[in-house]
Image (cartoon, helix red, strand yellow):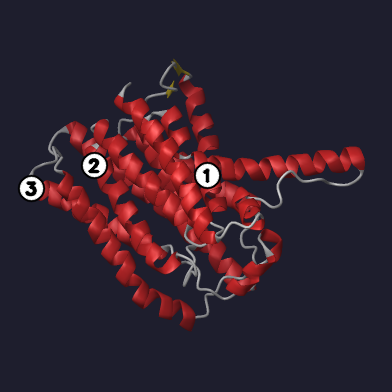
Amino acid sequence: MPFWINILVGLLAFIVAALGGKALLPWLHKIKFGQPIKVDFGPKWHANKQGTPTMGGILFIVGSVVGTAAGYALFRFLGTLDATTIAGDREALRVMSCVIFCILFGVIGFIDDFAKVAKKQNEGLKPMQKIVLQVVAAVLWLAAMYWFGDRSTVIDLSFVKFDISFFYYPLMILVILYLTNAVNLTDGVDGLCGTVTLVAMLIFTLICSKLQMETYTLFTMALAGGCLGFLVWNLHPAKCFMGDTGSMYLGAAVTAVGLATHKHLVLLLVALVYILEALSVMIQVTYFKYTKKKYGEGRRIFKMTPIHHHFEMSGFSEYKIVLTFSLFGLIVGLCGLLLVVFA
């Protein structure tokens, strides 16, 4: 596939997201869709961000969908995509199911954001409500992928592969739940989730290209461009937040593309920043409960979780956290790419 087509797709998504902010942000201010801030979930100085418009993730959602659709139309027009064969049609349908899957998660996030704004607090949907909706979306997506020809049940850890048959699907539902919510947890510092995901999508573009998953590169580049356009408005000091609307969409995108490659160790590496963010919360909560039961008072390993807040409480600026985490994501992502290249 000509690389310039991917560049055009990314550029279009960037323009849609960046220019879209000029219309979306004033509208969000007008309807008073500001983010409620609860200092229990972050450093006390984050209270200054109270009222910053949320649901800004709509920018890269629209940008990535428009970019992907335009790129696919261009492929068909130029005849560079073999969409007339059964294999080409099925891959296009699988990519479409990934996009719809991401939108479904974005809708779940939107409902959560809307509930927070309506209640003027930092709690929206109840955890169980979220999980049920996410499981339904995950089951529908896995069923669609199976229907469109993605029927591999092999776990690929690069150095070892094994088929777990039917158990693959329940395991992948758990992976989807963990990763999508891990990406959601990463959205706690201006520009962090958008920048880390920008890096992840660029890595996935190279991986999908190497694996000859050409249609997928349209979506990954469109989302990379959309994230870059969103960062125009989200870098510190943020003029808007992506909200759960955006972070749930990004979580679904990282998970869907990663699982579609069927390179599970590679996915672990590309998504390692998100995985560690969620793991820090799990470690903190578990240790706190254990020490409270054993010593009568809860103790903490980190100053605050997710772990980006630990760095923030340790004196890292928001810019430094974004740079550090994104650089780490780039390094481990390139390690994942090397596994694909030399496999």
Which corner quadrant of the image does residue 61 belong to?
bottom left
Three-letter code for the amino acid on which mark 1 is drawn = Tyr
Residue drawn at x 65%, y 69% as measured from the top left: 45
Mark 3 or 1, nearer chain start? 3
Camera-nearest label, 1 or 2: 1
Camera-nearest label, 3 or 1: 1
Q: Quadrant of the C terminus?
A: top left
Q: Is residue 33 left or right of residue 302?
A: left
Three-letter code for the amino acid on which mark 3 is drawn = Leu
Which residue is labeled 1 in the image?
Answer: 274
Q: Cα distance, mark 3 to mark 2?
A: 14 Å
Residue 104 in view (yes/no)? no
Q: Quadrant of the N terminus?
A: top left
Q: Out of 226 and 149, give the one closest to the viewer.
A: 226
Residue 74 at x, y = what percent?
13, 52
Return the mark for residue 78. 3
Mark 3 or 2, nearer chain start? 3
Return the mark for residue 215. 2
Give the residue furthest to the front: 315
Q: Cα distance, mark 3 to mark 1?
A: 38 Å
Which corner quadrant of the image does residue 62 belong to?
bottom left
Q: Is residue 23 left or right of residue 131?
A: left
Mark 1 or 2, nearer chain start? 2
